[in-house]
Image (spheres, rainbow, N blue to C red):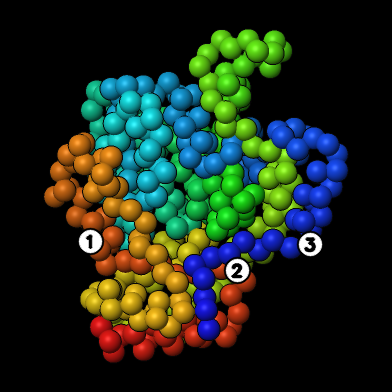
Amino acid sequence: MHIPIGSPDIGKDEIKAVTETMKTGWVTQGKKVEEFEKAFANYCGAKHGVAANTGTAALHLALSALNIKKGDEVITTPLSCVATTNPILYLGAKPVFADVEPETLNINPEQVEKKITAKTKAILPVHLFGHPVNLDPLIETAQEHNLPIIEDAAQAHGAKYKGKKVGSFGQISCFSFYADKLITTVEGGMALTNDEEIAKKMRLLRTFGMNEHNKFTHPVLGYNYKMSDIHAAIGVVQMRKLDHYIERRRKNIEYLKQKLNHPNLKLPEEQDYAFNVYYVCHILAQKGKEEIVKHLEHEGIETRPLLSFIPEQQPYRRLQPNPNSLQTAKKAHQNGFYVSNSPTLTEDQLDYLASTLISSLSDS
């Protein structure tokens, strides 16, 4: 049996939506993008959505709209996809890493407080693997120091903090619609905000910095981060399926936890304040991770590392963060990996995944 790390659930409705959009003759950014922006913003409880061609682009727009510039510092997590921090470097600013909580692997609000300096201009938490960050203490710290929060919710569509969907807490929040995310537009992203002026600025920056009422007039230096109507058409259909996808992912993890009660394996958790959407099934091995991963791959189950320990990536080594202050994140990266939690997994596949993990423990 082969279990890929993830594959998009693209069906006849998505194909029909793309075909109908192409037949209109308007395939670049247009009415479908606007429809998708409104639908997704409304779902998350935000007033404005600004679609982009990737989640990385959405983060770049967000940071730019908040005037992050060379010499500024942005506090963020060391454990994430490098796409979280790359836009900080694009702007000449410096990511400052705060360690994570051992239970959720999300940024630790207590550590954030310790990292604030006169140069700090924003806080960028990541709702890692679909589990919400502990937001109340983070918001309290941000308000005390007059700092904006940018939520990286790339893996957390529909996740909730104390009953309220993530993406509606920060000044700006950013999502990804890459092929393996909770919903997909194949490639794509979106920034959400309740601030109309910030939304206008992101839209301006998204389209070359061009004045929408005076074509080819550019009051600011902008980018080309537009989403096409073809991609948005897929997103509109996927939105109808999102709650079902979340339900399936939650049931998958519940099923695996019943099958995998083993002291060497720590499966995803859910804190009392959280509604976790379980983007993937991430696992921490107390020992023998390399042997476990090798066994899974040999048996046809794809795995991935626990994303990146960003401070050790080549473009970030020059920042020289203190490794002793990031031990929880580093240990998790060393001992962790993830496997698929696709909503299309069958019970047979889940049983095979569980049994293969159990058999891998004898090898480790």
Kindly identify the residue that appears in the image at 28 percent across and 89 percent down. 362
Badge 3 marks a residue whose secondary structure is: helix
Q: Which residue is mark 2?
A: 343
- 135 horizontally vs 95: left or right: right
Residue kind at label 2, given as amino acid type: Pro
Q: Is residue 192 visible?
A: no
Q: From the viewer's perspective, is the residue at label 3 or at label 1 nearer?
A: 3
Q: Which residue is mark 3?
A: 12
Query: Label for residue 123?
Result: none
- 206 horizontally vs 265: left or right: right
Q: Position of residue 20 (x, y in %)?
A: 84, 47
Give above or below for 357 relative to 27. below
Decide which of tag 2 and tag 1 comes sooner along the chain. Answer: 1
Badge 2 marks a residue whose secondary structure is: loop
Give above or below for 53 relative to 241. above
Kindly identify the residue that appears in the image at 41 percent across and 61 percent down. 271
Dot 1 crowding, Cα within 10 Å, few <14, some 14–19, many 20+: few
Q: Quadrant of residue 66?
A: top left
Give above or below for 285 relative to 17. below
Could you give the CA–CA distance between mark 2 and mark 3, rounded to whole angstroms?
17 Å
Q: Position of residue 189 (x, y in %)?
A: 57, 42
Query: Label for residue 331?
Result: 1
Q: Position of residue 34 (x, y in %)?
A: 72, 35
Badge 1 marks a residue whose secondary structure is: helix
Could you give the CA–CA distance between mark 3 and mark 1, rounded to whole angstroms?
44 Å
Residue kind at label 1, given as amino acid type: Lys
Camera-side residue of 41 and 78: 78
Decide which of tag 2 and tag 3 comes sooner along the chain. Answer: 3
